[in-house]
């Protein structure tokens, strides 16, 4: 069974993940660019397959009255995304994981809004204009 752990940069938020899909999505939209400073790459974890410690250090930002982004209020690491404030499934930024080498790319999404200062590799990974 695949599992991993991770943390924000300062270490006040830590988490464990297990039994998740090791394929990650890379989002090139303008909102993720502003949020992370580049693009957002994440894996999805279902409820019951993750455990977070230090939740009191998370600040949630409600985006467009809909989805929420979670970051560490101390170091600013952009860690979590969820579809709505009540959603129990969570996306975790892959840069926070301790063992990212077991992950592999699944798809690039919102490629139409990609910034022109970098290119997406032509490695066979789908390039999508929306999220699916
Ligand atoms: Zn932190
Ligand atoms: Zn995005």
Image: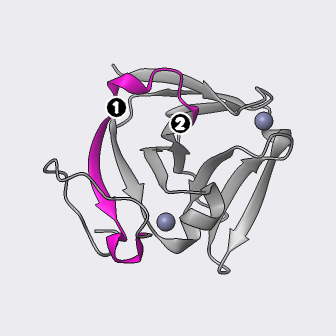
Q: Secondary structure at mark 1?
A: loop
Residue at x 81% of width, y 40% of height: 75
Residue at x 53% of width, y 29% of height: 97
- Looking at the image, residue 74 sits to the left or right of residue 67; the answer is right
Numbered badge on residue 131: none
Q: Which residue appears farthest toward the front when viewing the image?
A: 117
- Looking at the image, residue 82 sits to the left or right of residue 52; the answer is left
Q: Is residue 93 above or below residue 38?
A: above
Mark 1, Cα crowd under 10 Å, few <14 / some 14-19 / many 20+, is: some
Q: Is residue 111 above or below residue 78?
A: below
Name the residue nearer the viewer: 5 or 120: 120
- Looking at the image, residue 58 sits to the left or right of residue 7; the answer is right
Numbered badge on residue 95: 2
Measuring from the top left, give residue 38's x and y in whole percent.
Answer: 54, 57
Residue 84 in view, yes or no: no
Q: Secondary structure at mark 2?
A: helix
70 within the magenta span: no
Measuring from the top left, give residue 98's x and y in whole percent.
Answer: 53, 21
97 within the magenta span: yes
Q: Is residue 30 above or below residue 117?
A: below
Can you tell me whether the CB of the residue at mark 2 lies under 8 Å from the nearest atom of ligand 1? no
- Looking at the image, residue 91 sits to the left or right of residue 124; the answer is right
Measuring from the top left, give residue 119's x and y in whole percent.
Answer: 32, 59
> How does the figure colour the protein chain or chains?
one colour
Upstream in sequence: badge 1 or badge 2: 2
Measuring from the top left, give residue 70's x and y in whole percent.
Answer: 70, 53
Name the residue nearer the viewer: 113 or 22: 113
Instruction: Pick the quarter of the image with the N terminus.
Output: top left
Question: What residue range appears in magenta?
Answer: 96-114
Which residue in the protein does label 1 denote? 103
Residue at x 33% of width, y 34% of height: 22
């Amino acid at each position: 069974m695949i599992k991993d752990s991770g943390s924000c940069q300062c270490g006040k938020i830590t988490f464990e993940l297990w039994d998740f899909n090791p394929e990650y999505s890379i989002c090139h939209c303008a909102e993720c660019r502003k949020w992370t400073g580049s693009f957002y790459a994440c894996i999805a974890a279902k409820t019951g397959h993750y455990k977070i410690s230090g939740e009191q250090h998370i600040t949630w930002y409600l985006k467009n009255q809909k989805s929420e982004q979670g970051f560490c209020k101390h170091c600013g690491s952009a860690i979590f995304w969820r579809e709505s404030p009540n959603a129990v499934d969570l996306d975790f930024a892959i840069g926070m994981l301790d063992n990212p080498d077991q992950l592999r790319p699944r798809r690039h999404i919102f490629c139409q809004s990609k910034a022109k200062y970098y290119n997406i590799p032509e490695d066979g990974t789908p390039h999508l204009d929306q999220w699916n």
